[in-house]
Image: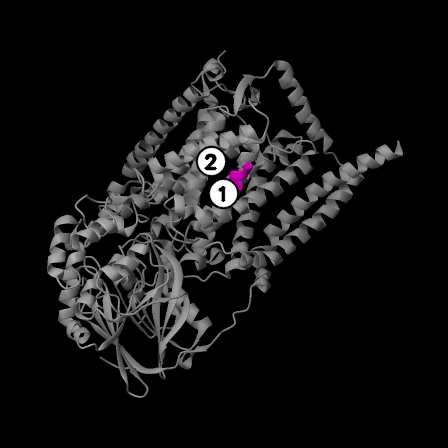
Amino acid sequence: MSEEKRKINRRDFFKGAAMGVMGGTLAMMGIYSYAPWRRVHFPKVERKLADIGACKHIKITNISETSWFENAHLMGDIKGAGGLLVNQYDYNWPPFGDGSGLGKGSYEKGIAKIKHLLPDKLDEAWAVAEKLAVHPENAGGYACLIELEELNGQKHKYLLDTGWSYKWTDECFKREGIDQMLKNREIEALFISHEHFDHFWGLPVTMKYDPTITMYIPEGFYPEGLQYIQDAGHKGKVIKVKPGLNPVIAGMASFVFAIPIICRVYGEQSLYFNIKDKGLVSVTGCCHQSIIQFAETAYREIKYENDNLYGVYGGLHISPFEDWDPKYDDLVISLGKYGFEKIGCNHCTGILCAKKFISAGYPVVEGTARNRSKDKAYLGNGDKIGFGTEV
Amino acid sequence: MERFGTNYLEERNLVARWPQPIPALVNLLFTLVIFYVTWWIFQDPRGWMRMYTPYVGYMYTRWWLIVLIWMVYLFNYWPFKRSWLEKTHPAIKGVVLTAVSFGVLYVLIKGFFEGLLGNFGLAYFNPGQLTKLPGVTEFFAIEYAALACLMFAAIASWLSPAWVVACEEAPWQDLKQPGKGVSILVMTFFLSTVIYFMTMHSHMGILYYPWQYFTSIAPPYWEKFANTVSGNFHVSWIMCCTVTVWIVETIWGRYPFNLIKRNWLRRLVAFFGIMAIAFTLHFFLYFVQELTWGPAIRGTRRAFAPDWRWLHVGEMAVFFLVPALFITFYCNNWPRRFSMPVNVLIRTAITIVAAILLYIFYYMTSHHFLGTQKGFSHPQQFPMIPTIWLINIWLLHHWFMDNWPGWKMVPKTADEMAKEHEAATAKIRDVRWNPSLGWGLGVGAVAGVVVYFLTIALLPVFYAAIDIIK
């Protein structure tokens, strides 16, 4: 009898224990998990303070920030093809049009129509694309020229991105004299921020003038993109930059973020410049990682003048299609505390966002709205900005 | 008197055609094939209809789930007669009832939300109205409208089953169909509307420039607490409510609320208890992300943004639902041999382990076969869509098709039902207060605290040891 009682007790004990374990765990989950004292579990931010050196100043020429001219056409195409996750090479956009219609293209079929014309007969190649692709007239592109002066006076020129439309990019290159700089081998390297159509597909235009230029691409390019570098006629060195910090010259480094991006793209490369006596400047193609993540990464990773975040140039990828989301308001609200002194935003930042920045009192450098840029709220095509110098 | 499908699920006897695990594996394979074919047809960005835009596909997925719940839990298969349910081949039932659910879904989205609400109430439910705004493209008009619709769905997918699982259909439990279904539908729809306005309307209000101060609270009241103005904070806990309702209904068998004898008290405690458990999950899964990826940084994007972290709480939570439903539907809620609390603890532990494995598997591989994007935090990466799509298929397979082909349906005899009822009552009676249970409860509670702190200590180490995104 007593043994039977002990068995019953043991069973009841386990019943209670099972109830208690779940109750205790759930209670702690509720009480502790969002309480302020949970922060003791967060690792302390250890600043690596990598020394990338410093430079005297940089000047940036906006070759083109208008990646496309009509949001409605671009988004209509994206919608028609199946949304933002469709592979960018399948949209049948120029230059990879094959005549089969929206959402039915591929790199292989598209490049087959124009490969024999690259990189020298771009007018002919684009004419083919205009016949076979979807909305060729909507293609623009993003590219900028960065001129850096070292502390010893030595000057360097770099391209960040190379546009989309051959016709538009070539026109912009000629407008800003980039064609001659490339021919003269004045531009030392082409940094590709990411594989997106509007930053990368205009590659043959750069190749037309300097096929030997060194290219820095972020790790994560898909096979089509890697093939396009060859098919575009590139004969120089291609450096695949791994995620993390990659110093280039004194005062300049690139940083690759391993992040997924719409239209099946992976990885973005952005640039840091440490300006003597001023602070850090970030120059971005689209900044899909977000400007605040870029700033926080700089804080963790590198040493910069006066521990000051000095300036920003480029696309900040907030409302590229003039869409909006409350999370963008989080950015607008939070950006102020980082203390940037000069904000030269454009492109995928969105005009609406630039206006919200201006309303919030941020030091946005306004533009001239020339050369098909739509609004003075941000730096437009042909506008220039200097960090550590005036232009 | 025609009973339609009242108590149909409880009164059917599902007899396995082969010894386990064969029927479970056969059904898993069968439903996965249906999942993949329908995913390709409706959702896949490389497929036919490409509804994974993502919000359009997500909206239809969420509302389809609710329509299935309405048809079975609220309306008990009405207007389909009991004899039809019992005698028709499962495949035919599956096709017919699924077709009806699609019809209801279409009328609901196009008729009620877009047509009625969108044209006569809130413009943001109708893409056509939204495109009248300067600068809003057709794509984002459709996405915004779908977002509003699916946020409503998130709430309804918690409240509709909660009224049955927690409130036991009270006070309409004795009504005949369709009176009962209509009553619960009206009540849960009303509550969903109230909660929608209190949680999601402000999110929609600040989508536009300038913020719609005069029609929605802006900035929203949760901004400081949640560290974001985004309504994803609410998506998170509401999603956790949905998951908890189904956990309670399936692997917990309505435990521990079924231990409360007094009807009104049990129903009240169950309704708010489910919410309380959901909130613990809501906070814990946010903390899990802080422990593995570091604290969120407001204003940033992707994995470090608080709004995405809250959304990801909901995404993580839904991974728990998949194994929980599988255990109940295809494993007959194994194990059943121990006392109710021990059974529930074991099932919960299995579910947690399976959910973690599924999470890892999903993020390691899904971009290879679902057409989604590699990575955790892509704005178009919505694991809730494929997981809920699979859950929908399992629900229709279990509810409409009687687990065919792995099982066949035989109506239970009155004797079988009486025995089953007695066994269930005995299980509840078995959990009664005594000193041994009290000691166990105390030791268990301490062990629960230890489990919690061990978990949060080991999580960063565990995460660092696994390379999920290669």
Which residue sits at x=17%, y=74%?
A183
Question: As drawn, is B405 to the left or to the right of B435?
Answer: left
Which residue sits at x=60%, y=61%?
A37
Residue B204: % across, % down: 35, 48
Magenta stretch prevailing secondary structure: helix
Mark sitting on residue A31: none
Badge 1 marks a residue whose secondary structure is helix
Q: Chain of mark 1?
A: B
Of the 4 image quadrants, the one containing the C terminus of chain A is: bottom left
Residue that mark 2 sits on = B391
Q: Is residue A380 visible?
A: no
Residue A268: % across, % down: 35, 62
**Rendered view: B343 above or below A339:** above
Question: As drawn, is B455 to the left or to the right of B81?
Answer: right
Of the 4 image quadrants, the one containing the N terminus of chain A is: top right
Region in magenta: B320-324
**Rendered view: B318 above or below A311:** above
Badge 2 marks a residue whose secondary structure is helix
Do the numbered discs 1 and 2 sit on residues whose CB atoms are within 8 Å?
A: yes
| Quadrant assignment, res A282 | bottom left
Q: Chain of mark 2?
A: B
